Amino acid sequence: MTVTTPSAPHDSQPALKIALLGAGTVGSQVARILTEDAEMLAARVGARLELAGVFVRNPDGRRDYQLPRELYTTDAEALVDSADIVLELMGGIEPAKSLIERAIGNGSAVVTGNKALLAQSGSELFAAAAEAGTQLSFEASVAGAIPILRPLRDSLAGDTVTRVMGIANGTTNYILDQMDTTGAAFDDALADAQELGYAEADPTADIEGHDAAAKAAILANLAFHAPFRIDEVYCEGITRITAADNEAASEAGYVIKLLAIAERITAGDGTAGAVLRVHPTLLPREHPLAAVRGAFNAVFVETQNAGELMFYGPGAGGAPTASAVMGDTVSIARRLVRGGAGRTHTPRSVVPALPVGEARTSYMVVIRVADRPGVLAAIASAVAEHGVSIESMRQVPLAEDDLVVEESDEAYTDEAPESLLRIITHEAKEQNLAATVATIKELDVVTEVVSVLRVEGN
Ligand SMILES: NC(=O)c1ccc[n+]([C@@H]2O[C@H](COP(=O)([O-])OP(=O)(O)OC[C@H]3O[C@@H](n4cnc5c(N)ncnc54)[C@H](O)[C@@H]3O)[C@@H](O)[C@H]2O)c1
Ligand SMILES: N[C@@H](CCO)C(=O)O
Ligand code: NA
């Protein structure tokens, strides 16, 4: 791609044409930076970054950052065809995928923050970019402003990453943090997160864990140098967390966070692979991840030689994410000015995604039991039956007014007081824990399994 030399006498520097697709929360901030920091960027790149146009649904709409009307267009194809670097900040699968493929086909470089698209079709797009000898960069797609993907792909390329664990969705962390620190209601905290520009266009992606799952697939792709897709990620969001879960967590000195975990393990049948999972997780309040506030993200990377690394920063929001987009843009622009092939990401290893049942983690199981002799022994034997060992067990007698006595609840009388049994297990296989819970539910001393949550960082 040749750098064009503008005719205007006052602009002695060559110019690179930038196409911006989408001018929402992130796109409008990228437009602002390209405009307000034009001189700084030109000095840093060695060429002017010239905004060729902005693809939007409605050129006459009002935006967070208003560009001259003539820059807005509804003709995405013509804009893409005119650009050296295409910034895809629309979200969704189509028309984003087709426009990225068009840009790559033109030999243009692409920057995207679209984790949903990369977690579904990343391998295909990476291969197309490698084939075309152009660059597809996507630092903004995981953990917002935090430079995590380039370190995984480049800085740690000579090491072996064994596990990546972190808070990778800002919206759910903001919600959980508001609920934990201010007692805010779920819906109010979600509305705030949307207002603050953290949430996806459809926030279901955030609260049901799909966004974090997409990021887990991308992190695993770069960490393990192998292709992974979102449908290989076990995914549980935060909408099923109950007040009882929060109470049990708080009483036991834990906080609930939505974690994305990608770890290399060997399955029971000897297959070496990786388990990718996203779920609400109990963390001890003193754990560094427990202290992550608001829409911040934090990712731990465990490696064979570097040991454990932690990356921390704003995981969502227009300006922080625009910072990551601009980092990729400047890096690509510098290469275009000096020439040379684009750096591509072509995962070559084969690391099978293993079922979540093979994952090993600790659990907190809270059970409501009749308070009578033999209960603890019955529970302990049910747990041992499935190869799960107990780290601690605490019984909390329930005052009568703690109990919701249903009409049909004949079993409950003054003679049979109840208590809550809180069990923390040692690491156990997911499938063994599931079998244990099923057995416990059948015991006649058990009124209810109140809560089952995974525990990390014990
Ligand atoms: N908001 C964040 O904090 C954040 C952080 C990291 C990555 N991202 C990703 O960046 C991308 C953009 O996110 P956002 O928060 O700016 O979203 P947004 O919804 O605020 O903005 C998207 C913009 O693209 C436009 N758009 C979408 N589909 C279009 C179409 N078919 N035709 C024309 N215009 C279209 C929308 O009108 C909107 O202006 C998404 O892929 C998102 O997942 C967002
Ligand atoms: N909705 C996403 C945006 C950043 O990817 C989040 O809350 O983390
Ligand atoms: Na990032």
Image: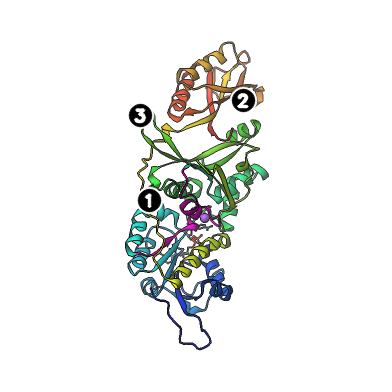
Q: Nearer the viewer, residue 190 or 430?
A: 430
Asked which secondary structure carries label 3, the reply is loop
283 in magenta: no
Asked which secondary structure carries label 2, the reply is loop
- Residues at marks 1 and 3, CA–CA distance in whole angstroms: 25 Å
- The residue sitting at 46% across, 19% down in the picture is 442
Tell me residue 422's x, y (percent): 59, 25
Crowding around mark 3 (Cα neighbors within 10 Å: few <14, some 14 to 19, many 20+) is few
Does the Cβ of the disc 1 residue fall within 8 Å of ligand 3?
Answer: no
Crowding around mark 2 (Cα neighbors within 10 Å: few <14, some 14 to 19, many 20+) is few
- Mark 1 or mark 2, which has the lower sequence index? 1
Say which residue label 2 marks. 403
Tell me residue 33's x, y (percent): 56, 70
Q: Please name the amino acid that badge 1 sits on.
A: Pro
Q: From the image, which quarter does the N terminus lie in?
A: bottom left
Up-down relation of residue 152 to residue 374 (above or below): below
Residue 397: give its label: none
- Mark 2 or mark 3, which has the lower sequence index? 3
Q: Which residues are magenta?
A: 133-160
Say which residue label 3 marks. 269
Q: Please name the amino acid that badge 2 sits on.
A: Leu
Up-down relation of residue 31 to residue 409 (above or below): below
- Mark 1 or mark 3, which has the lower sequence index? 3
143 in magenta: yes
Is the residue under label 3 in contact with that under label 1 (CB below 8 Å)?
Answer: no
Say which residue label 1 marks. 347
Asked which secondary structure carries label 1, the reply is loop
